[in-house]
Image: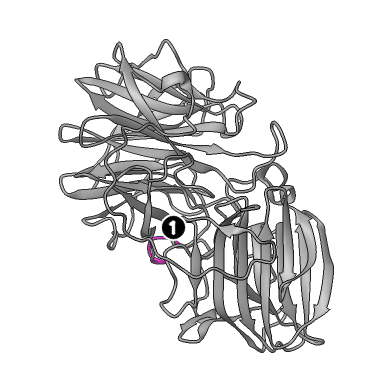
Amino acid sequence: MHTENPVLPGFHPDPTVCRVGETFYLATSSFEFVPGVPLYRSDTLVDWEPIGHVLTRDSQLDTRDARSSGAIFAPTLRHRDGTVYLTTTDTSGGGHFVVTADDPAGEWSDPVFVDAPGIDPDLFWDGDTPYFTYFTGDPDRGIEQAEIDLDTGALGEPRTIWTGLDDPYAEAPHLYERDGTYYLVVAEGGTHTGHSVVVARSDDPTGPFEPAPENPILTHRTRFQYDVHAVGHADLVTDADGNWWLVCLGIRPHSGFPGWHHLGRETFLAPVTWDDGWPVVPGGELPGELPADLPESHELPGGHDAPGNHDPHGDAPVGDRSPVRHTDTDFADGRGVEWFWRRTPDRDRYAFTDDGLVLSGGPETLSEQGTTGIYRRQTDFDCRVRADLDFDPAPGDEAGIALVMDEQHHYSVGVVGGEREAVVRLRIGDAAEVTARTQVGEHVTLGIDAETERYRFLVDGKELADARSKYLATEVAGGFTGVVVGPYATGNGEAADSSALFERFVYEPVERGA
């Protein structure tokens, strides 16, 4: 069993968790990506199997017009009486909503919208009474709460229950009950290096709430020497033995403090104990290696052995073969659970065939919304990406593999029409440049070798160019996501005349020098 944090590496922010029997389910924010709200299952709280997404239909989510880092913010996942509930906010659409499912791995309902301001909604039941709690976005109103009719989304009279301990922009409220006492857990200090977990309690779910004397119960805001920063946005869960655990987000910057982080905000796990009726994270910090008293590990589904690819650097693949950290596909079985689009796609541009993935580019470039492309998360600082491409492009057509943070920050290695060349493109803010080119045949293997500080771009095993990873980092690009990687196709301003066949795509973490 893997016992090191993060338990979900790469772009997995704002985690929320619930337990059904002895099985845990976890969801995270997805922003403009489609399908929306990735969903994971675990028996151990450590080894998470991707089982799909909550928002899979256009009737649930349409992000064609969503801004980068817009759309789906901060879900809350809860289970009650055989039904699983998820509430979240579409910041580029209809606002707060609730969806339900009998089986989290199955179909989820269409949204029931809730007319309230702000973000980060929570669901909590006191007996048969459900409460809807949310951050209004207004520092004077703070976090509000109201009773909710879950069939219609109608709210009762809202009331402010928290306006912040040190920060009036307190976010991510979650309510819990333990031994007749009600606990409010919130995120304060922003979502970067000042992030923290604050707790308060009351004899009633509606408050008033008394802050814990040792707040914040978890933060790394003064631990500059640590490898993990921006710790916060927590959700609590109990295991079948009554032990309490906390999931939260954090970042792993490089190049010193505060540094740069390009993998995104990731999901971490910590144990929770109780002292004088207050939840406590031992030491007030995330453990690097998790404690031995995790729920017992059962045989884990979803693992698979996949052949490695030629490694020109002599590095070795890492042993974890779960789809979270390893992809080796010919696309014959369709879109795997680890794949997604950057916005609601034109599905006519994508064909999953026995020969591979066929992409038909539209006029949009990688610097525009609506580009033909399908992606998975970069989950490892050190990893290797390879794509076998069969492509005879017309002039103006292009296809390849891209590392994307947003429309203004992306790198790619692809094949262009005309002279049929492989080119390496870098887009950093307002600057765009082709840094290398070489002629290629109709069949080519494109590659990216990632290291913590640098990406190296290869064509048929030969390195053409490199680029710094920092320019795809949040500290440069802004936003709330992380780097994603995958195949793309474009007509570069014109409707594409040809299709690109991706026969195989490999993503695998590596251990340098192994």
34 horizontally vs 101: left or right: right
Residue 470 in view of the camera:
yes
Left or right: 278 in relation to 188: left
Amino acid, disc 1: Gly
Label 1: few (<14), some (14–19) or many (≥20) C-alpha neighbours in 10 Å: many
Count of numbered marks: 1
Q: Which of 302 and 59 is in front in this view?
A: 302
Residue 97 lies within the magenta run: no
The residue tagged 1 is 36
Residue beneath the point at 55% across and 43% down: 265
Identify the secondary structure beneath mark 1.
strand
Any part of residue 151 in sight: no
Residue 58: within the magenta?
yes
User: Which percent across, then down, holds residue 182?
Assistant: 27, 22
Q: Which color scheme did the rendering employ for the protein?
A: one colour
Instruction: Kindly report the secondary structure that dominates the magenta region of the rendered protein.
Output: loop
Please give the range of residues in magenta.
57-61
- Residue 390 in percent (x, y) is at 63, 85
- Camera-side residue: 10 or 29? 10
> x, y (%) of residue 64?
54, 64
Q: Which of 470 and 201 is in front in this view?
A: 470
* Residue 441 in picture, x, y percent from top left: 73, 87
Q: Residue at x 27, y 62 (%)?
A: 106
Q: Is residue 289 above or below residue 99?
A: above
